[in-house]
Amino acid sequence: MEKYNIPISACIIAQNEEKYIAKAIENVLPYVGEVVVCDGGSTDNTLSICAKLGCLIYNRPFDYHFANQRNFASSKCNKDWILWADADEYFSTAFLENLSKMITKPNAAAFKVWRKSIFDDELRGEDYQWRLSKKNKTKWANKIHEDMIVDGGWYYLPKDLYMIHEHTMDKQRWSNALYYNINNGINERPAENIKMEYLDGEWRNV
C-alpha cells in the first residue's frame, strides 16, 4: 500500500514486545509519515524487529512512570500530530482511513478512540483511550493508566472508528503485577512467571 502523505508520527513505547510489536507497526506504517519507538530496555528481539521495519528507535531506561516515557517519546516525533499505539494494539481500517479528516478538524487537539480489549480471543472489555493528539497541545500525566492534559478541543470518536487491544490473559495478569508494583513504589519488573488479578477485593497472585 502506498503511504498516505499526512503529518502524523505513530509512536509506540515498548519493552520486550517481540510477540506483538510487528503487527502494531505494520498496521499503522502505510498511513503515517514515520513510526517512532521508545524502548525501555528490551532484552528480546523487539529492537531488531523495529529496525527491520524502518522505525526511528530511541532508548530511555524505563523509570516506572509511563507518562514520562510517553512524553520523552513525544519529544522525538517530527510530525505535528501523534498517533499513539501500545505494542499490542492495532487500529481498524476505518479509523486509519479517516485520520486525515480528524487532524483537519478546526481547533482539534486530541481524540479519544474506542478500544476493544480481546484476551485469549475473548472480548474482555471496552473503553475510550487517548490515541491521537497534537504534539504541541498535549502532555501525558500519571505513572500508570495515563491521562492526557489537553490545551484545546478534544473529542470522542464514533465507536465504529475503533482499535483493538489484543494479547493473552497471562500477559494481562503480568501487566497487572507490574501496575501493582508501580502503584506501591516497587520499581522493578515482576518475574516473568508472576501473574496477578484483582479478586474478591484484593490483589492476588494467580
Image: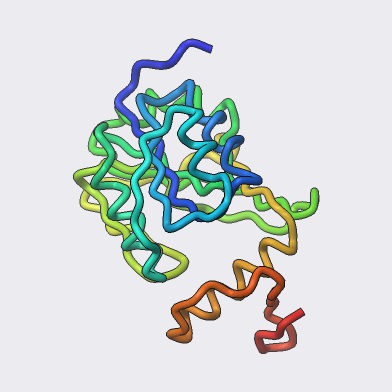
> Considering only vertical position in the picture, is 116 above or below 9?
below
Left or right: where does residue 84 sit relative to residue 123? left
In this view, which residue lies farthest toward the top? Answer: 2
* Residue 31 appears anywhere in the view: yes
Quadrant in which the N terminus appears:
top right
Left or right: where does residue 38 sit relative to residue 139? right
Location of residue 102 by image quarter: top left
* Residue 162 appears anywhere in the view: no
> Which percent across, then down, holds residue 138?
26, 51
Quadrant in which the C terminus appears:
bottom right
> Which percent across, then down, holds residue 114?
55, 46
Q: Residue at x 41, y 71 (%)?
A: 64
Q: How many callouts does the rendering have?
A: 0
> Which percent across, then down, holds residue 146?
41, 63
Q: Residue at x 35, y 16 (%)?
A: 5
> Considering only vertical position in the picture, is 48 above or below 139?
above
Q: Residue at x 60, y 67 (%)?
A: 175
> Considering only vertical position in the picture, is 131 above or below 16?
above
> Considering only vertical position in the picture, is 100 above or below 120?
above
Q: Residue at x 63, y 44 (%)?
A: 20
Location of residue 69 by image quarter: bottom left
Location of residue 190 by image quarter: bottom right
> Which percent across, then down, holds residue 139?
27, 55
How are the residues colored? rainbow
Left or right: where does residue 197 sit relative to residue 80? right
Q: In terms of depth relative to the viewer, which is nearer, 151 or 193? A: 193
